[in-house]
Every structure is written in structure tokens, then in C-alpha cells.
Amino acid sequence: MDKKKPLIFEPVYYYSREHRLQKAPASVRALHTGGVKRSGIFNTLTGTRSNRFMLMTIVILFVFISILTRMTNAIGSYQLGGNSLTLNARTTAGETYLEINKIYKEEAFIGTIKVAVSTPSGNEGITVEQIAFSMLPEEQYRILIPFKAPQYLVVLQMDTGEYISVKVNRRG
């Protein structure tokens, strides 16, 4: 028996890169010869009118969000004994409350705090309460204010004598 040998043949390709490039536009020929200089990222971002508009929109939004973030963190945020506090005076169902939101940070003060609330002129009187800071990561305290005013003067004092004095505007 004869063993048949497999047919070995070379495939014929009818593709010619040179022939294709001869018919291509000049910009395609320049890409293959390396004659095209690539534009930078700035030129890419500002190359067309729509790209410039999109870039300006992103920049404006970034600036706006950055400013807004800094303003909201700066207004009503205070430090006392290493704890971060936010104070708000709100009127709910005809009663005015002072809300104290505390965020505990490591090695921050834990203990009692005296809270004194009055009007800036002092004509309405003064109310004094005592609250206790614990190691919970977040706490909220509400103190009833027996008098109404558009603005309150709040003094928070720790057992160690350290204190902060803050003017709080009433909302609601």
C-alpha cells in the first residue's frame, strides 16, 4: 500500500498593500510613511467647537463644585476638643430647637459639655443645658430653646474650660 502524501501548496494572495496605498488618499499614505505628527492632548481637547464646549463645561462644573464644597464645610462647622460640630437652630411645630451634630475623631474629648443659649442682645434670657459626648462616631443632640429670635448666641464649654462661642441663625 502506498501512503498518500498530503498536498502541500502555497495559498495565493491577491492583496497588495502597495497597490491599495496607491489608490488611498494622501492622509492615509502619510499615516503609513510616518509623516503625520500626532497632536497633543490639549489640541485634541480643543480641536473642535464641541470639544472646547465640553472642556469648558467640565472646568466650570469642577470649579463650582469645589467652591460649593468648601463653603458648605466652612459654614456651621466648628471644632471643640477634637470633635467636629455643626450647629443649627430650627423651628418645628412652633418650637425652636438647637441641633448639635457631633462627629467623633480619634483622641477627641469625651465627657460633659455645658451649652448656653441666648439672644445676641441677652434681652430674652438664657438657657443652660448639659450634654455628654461619647465615643460614638456620630451623635445628634436637640436642645429646646424657650424663646424665639432670628439669631442665637451659643456657648459650648468642656469640663477642661475650653469653649467656643458661635452665632447661629434660626431656620424655619
Image (cartoon, helix red, strand yellow):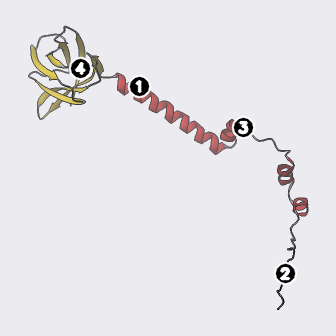
Q: Which tag is nearer the camera, tag 3 or tag 2?
A: 2
Cα separation, mark 3 vs mark 1, equals 33 Å
Residue type indicated by callout 4? Val
Tell me what residue is drawn at x 63 percent, y 39 percent: 52
Q: Which residue is mark 2?
A: 7
Taking depth in this image into account, of 20 and 116 the one nearest to the observer is: 20
The quadrant of the picture occupied by the N terminus is: bottom right
Q: Amino acid at mark 2?
A: Leu
Q: Which badge, 3 or 1, is on the more N-terminal residue?
A: 3
* CA gap, disc 3 and disc 2: 54 Å
Image spot of residue 6 (x, y percent): 82, 81
Query: Is label 3 or label 1 in front?
Result: 3
Return the residue at label 4.
Answer: 168
Distance from the alpha carbon under mark 1 to that under mark 2: 78 Å
Residue type (three-letter) at the residue carrying disc 1: Arg
Report x, y in % for residue 44.
69, 41
